[in-house]
Each structure stands twice: as structure tokens, then as C-alpha cells.
Image (tube, rainbow, N blue to C red):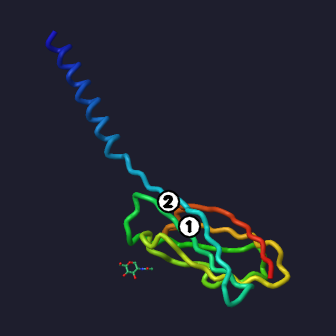
Amino acid sequence: MKSTLFIILLFLFMTVEVYSKIIKQIKTMDLVSLPIVITKDKHDPNNYIVKSQWFGFGHSDDEKVTHILTCQENSVKIKHTHQVKNFSDYEAYYEIKVPKDTDIVNCERSMEMFDGEFLGYSTFSFRHKS
Ligand SMILES: *[C@@H]1O[C@H](CO)[C@@H](O)[C@H](O)[C@H]1NC(C)=O
């Protein structure tokens, strides 16, 4: 009888042990890509300012995020396609120059941590008229 009780207690103890280990393992890290905002340059109709924003949790404020913007069209020029930001910056700006005769511009953005860990990817297109 006593040994049965001991085994039950031992089993309960072990269950709690395992449970508490699982609790310690829970860690959520996430980065959410927010919608892109594209603004036409007032002074140059072939120039665009692209604002990319993100949010997330589980990252420290000064964690480095490499933010990359590229466009499929080789004729489209982007200033500073790779930008290293602090996670807590929550935004990155790009200047895109599009040739006059381009109709639709297809671009993509991706975000990575410094160690190359992938955080997010999205594509966007916009029509260029000048
Ligand atoms: C990141 O934040 C640190 C501390 O606030 C600051 O010194 C540094 O210049 C920032 N780096 C970038 C890339 O913004």
C-alpha cells in the first residue's frame, strides 16, 4: 500500500517536472509584415518612395533586421536595396526610380535576422504612369 502511494506520488512529481519543462520551452518570436505604402515623388513623376513597416514580438529592440527590397525589372533602380535596421525601427524607406516606358513594376520585400533566419516575405506590384 505504501509503495503504491509512493509510486503514485513519484508519478505525479514526474508529471509536474515534465510539465514545468514544457512551460520553460515556450517562447514565441514573430514578425508581421505590414502593408506597403507607395508614394509618388512630387518633384519627379518617375520616382517613388516605398515605406515598408513591420511589427512583432519576442525580439529585442536592438535586434538587427536586414530588410531587402528588389524589383523584377532590371531597369528599375532602387537606392539601398539592403538595409540593416533595429527591430524597433518598425519601418524602412526606399527610393525607386522607374523608367518612363515601364507599365507595371513587380517587387518583393523580405526580412531576415542577422544570422540569416528568415522572418517574412511579400510581393507587391504597382502601375507606373508618367
Ligand atoms: C540601433 O539602436 C542603437 C541603440 O539605440 C543605436 O545606437 C544604433 O545606431 C541603432 N542602429 C540602427 C541600424 O539603427
Return the x and y of residue 22 as percentages of the image width and height.
35, 40
Label 2 and label 1: CA atoms lie apart by 9 Å
Left or right for 64, reference 80: left
Residues at circles 2 and 1 in contact by the CB criterion of under 8 Å? yes
Q: Earlier in the sequence, mark 2 or mark 1?
A: 2
As drawn, 8 above or below 54: above
Q: Quadrant of residue 9?
A: top left
Q: Label 1 belongs to which residue?
A: 111
- The answer to whether the residue bearing label 1 lies less than 8 angstroms from the nearest atom of ligand 1 is no
Q: In terms of depth relative to the viewer, which is nearer, 106 or 43? A: 43
- Quarter of the displayed picture in which ligand 1 can be seen: bottom left
Return the x and y of residue 70 as percentages of the image width and height.
68, 74
**Label of residue 31 in the image:** 2
Return the x and y of residue 8 as percentages of the image width and height.
23, 19
As drawn, 73 above or below 44: above
Return the x and y of residue 69 as percentages of the image width and height.
63, 74
- The structure residue drawn at horizontal position 16% and vertical position 9%, both measured from the top left corner, is 1
How many discs mark residues in the rendered view?
A: 2
Q: In terms of depth relative to the viewer, which is nearer, 99 or 117? A: 99
Q: In terms of depth relative to the viewer, which is nearer, 47 or 12? A: 47
Q: Residue furthest left?
A: 2
> What's under tag 1, amino acid-wise?
Met
